[in-house]
């Protein structure tokens, strides 16, 4: 069996260099090029998926642990198991409790959250790259 | 019986509702310019015969396919009302001819407007970049670019009847309303939690600026959304995101790196210093650079909302267009831009 990475690479090359240029109608032509682009992303996603998911899980567990250790952190952390959805809730609680926490405590917790968000984002950027929005 | 084409249906509609008494309507120069992302746009010339002889007029028709990425935030009826209101002002815009809500005619609501001479050259293409770079050297188009924006910001929107768009309260209300609007689109579209986006939204809510004065704001003022004829802006088009709000919202968009793809010129056509000086002179406003930096983050959040909506339409099975599917990979990239703008 041809290795999947090589096979995907050949399909992408065929879509990009053979099929798409031969199509005259603009809409199907754009679809052929888009199929090639999406397959490129998928190839990276398949290759890195396991590593990325485990790195994200470790990052979230570490962040929730650190926030819990801050003064007033238990209330901010909430009772949820660390996950990206739970992190969204944590961020909202942090801003909503800003006045009660005081500016210094807010900044400390927000700094931890932002550093963690950067590392989570960097995991996703391994698949998407940084150049195109 | 063969299904009637869009052209045949439109010709019948024009004869019945727009130019009563017209006979032998024939279309030429028919071009469909936008497919898939927003409203479908058809540009054409119509020739017909009436009792007083032959006639010819250019039209642009836009149809809502029901799968535009702005979903219900973009309304053709509102666009038509905006065009009619702007006819009474100095803003360069096409005349609105009709709005038809009956979906049985073309499969979705549609509107008609004047075909304006010129072309909305796409600034992202190689040809477009060259077109704007050469026009910038001649100097007439950069001046016209600023004048058309100032005409929008200086117009008396209450007198023009544009207050139907909704008038924000004083202070931070405009920014908070915009955030709420885009949060609504995100809520409809999102497929998985996006904590970076949550942080960006919470920061935006906590740092909303106050407005100097309310103005009529286009919401996406850039080359590509402007018709250019003989080095002049012949019309401002793409009326989908307009609001009554902070004119700095448009200024921030012009100043943004998002719209120039590596060109040293703002919107690929105007020098930064010239834009700032001339805009301030024409409007009497002082550009608030801090507010502009804030709105640039809001634009990044808005762009994330666009991409989430586009990929959501694909995931929901409402569109089979792979260009929409591809945008799912653009979300982390625009969130990276926003994170960097906020310093993380």
Image (cartoon, rainbow, N blue to C red):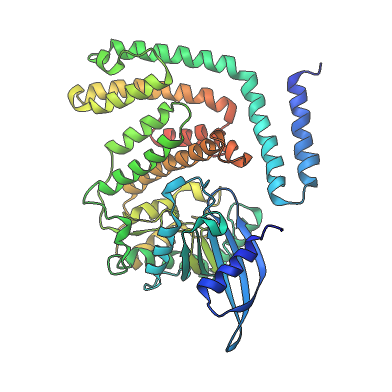
Residue B38 relative to residue B274: left or right: right
Tell me which corner region of the image, top left, top right, bottom left or bottom right, holds residue A76: top left
Residue under the image location 37 percent in, 73 percent down: B88
Q: Which residue sits furthest left? A: A100
Q: Between residues B69 and A127, which one lies in front from this camera angle?
A: B69
Residue B117 seen in render = no
Residue B50 relative to residue B209: left or right: right
Indicate the position of residue A50 as horizontal and vertical percent values. Answer: 58, 14
Q: Which residue sits furthest bottom? A: B52
Indicate the position of residue B179 as horizontal and vertical percent values. Answer: 34, 42
Indicate the position of residue A31 as horizontal and vertical percent values. Answer: 68, 42
Residue under the image location 37 percent in, 68 percent down: B85
On the rendered image, what quadrant is the N terminus of chain A found in? Answer: top right
Residue A52 seen in render = yes
Indicate the position of residue A79 as horizontal and vertical percent values. Answer: 31, 13
Tell me which corner region of the image, top left, top right, bottom left or bottom right, holds residue A32: top right
Report the label total: 0
Residue under the image location 62 percent in, 42 percent down: B321
On the rendered image, what quadrant is the C terminus of chain A found in? Answer: top right
Vertical arrangement, residue A24 with respect to residue A60, above or below: below
Q: Between residues B141 and B14, which one lies in front from this camera angle?
A: B14
Q: Between residues B313 and B214, which one lies in front from this camera angle?
A: B313
């Amino acid at each position: 069996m041809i290795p999947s990475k090589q096979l995907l690479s050949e399909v992408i090359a065929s879509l990009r260099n053979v099929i798409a240029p031969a199509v005259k109608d603009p809409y199907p032509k754009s679809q052929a090029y888009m199929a090639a682009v999406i397959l490129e992303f998928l190839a990276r996603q398949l290759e890195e998926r396991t590593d990325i998911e485990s790195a994200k899980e470790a990052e979230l567990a570490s962040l929730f642990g650190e926030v819990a250790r801050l003064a007033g952190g238990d209330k901010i952390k909430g009772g949820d198991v660390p996950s990206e959805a739970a992190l969204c809730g944590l961020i909202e609680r942090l801003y909503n409790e800003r006045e009660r926490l005081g500016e210094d405590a807010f900044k400390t917790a927000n700094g931890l959250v932002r550093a963690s968000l950067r590392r989570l984002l960097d995991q996703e950027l391994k698949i998407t790259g940084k150049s195109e929005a | 019986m063969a299904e009637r084409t869009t052209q045949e249906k439109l010709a019948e509609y024009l004869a019945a509702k727009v130019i009563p008494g017209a006979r032998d309507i024939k279309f030429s120069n028919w071009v469909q310019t936008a497919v898939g992302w927003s409203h479908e746009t058809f540009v054409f010339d119509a020739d017909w015969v009436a009792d007083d002889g032959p006639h010819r007029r250019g039209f642009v028709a836009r149809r809502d396919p029901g799968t535009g990425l702005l979903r219900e935030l973009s309304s053709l009826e509102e666009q038509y009302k905006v065009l009619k209101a702007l006819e009474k002002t100095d803003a360069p815009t096409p005349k609105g001819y009709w709005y038809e809500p009956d979906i049985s005619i073309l499969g979705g609501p549609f509107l008609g407007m004047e075909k304006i001479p010129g072309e909305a050259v796409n600034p992202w293409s190689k040809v477009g970049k060259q077109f704007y770079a050469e026009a910038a050297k001649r100097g007439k188009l950069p001046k016209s670019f600023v004048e058309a924006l100032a005409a929008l910001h200086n117009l008396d929107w209450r007198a023009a009847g544009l207050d139907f768009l909704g008038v924000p309260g004083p202070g931070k209300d405009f920014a908070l309303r915009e955030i709420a609007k885009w949060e609504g689109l995100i809520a409809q579209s999102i497929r998985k939690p996006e904590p970076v986006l949550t942080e960006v939204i919470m920061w935006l809510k906590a740092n909303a600026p106050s407005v100097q004065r309310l103005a009529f704001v286009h919401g996406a003022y850039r080359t590509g959304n402007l018709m250019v004829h003989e080095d002049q802006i012949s019309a401002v088009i793409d009326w989908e995101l307009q609001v009554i709000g902070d004119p700095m919202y448009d200024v921030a968009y012009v100043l943004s790196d998002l719209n120039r793809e590596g060109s040293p010129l703002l919107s690929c056509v105007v020098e930064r210093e010239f834009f700032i000086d001339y805009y301030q002179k024409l409007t009497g406003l002082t550009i608030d650079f801090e507010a502009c930096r804030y709105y640039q983050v809001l634009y990044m959040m808005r762009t994330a909302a666009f991409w989430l909506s586009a990929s959501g339409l694909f995931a929901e099975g409402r569109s089979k267009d792979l260009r929409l599917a591809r945008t799912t990979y653009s979300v982390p990239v625009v969130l990276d831009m926003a994170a960097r703008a906020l310093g993380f």
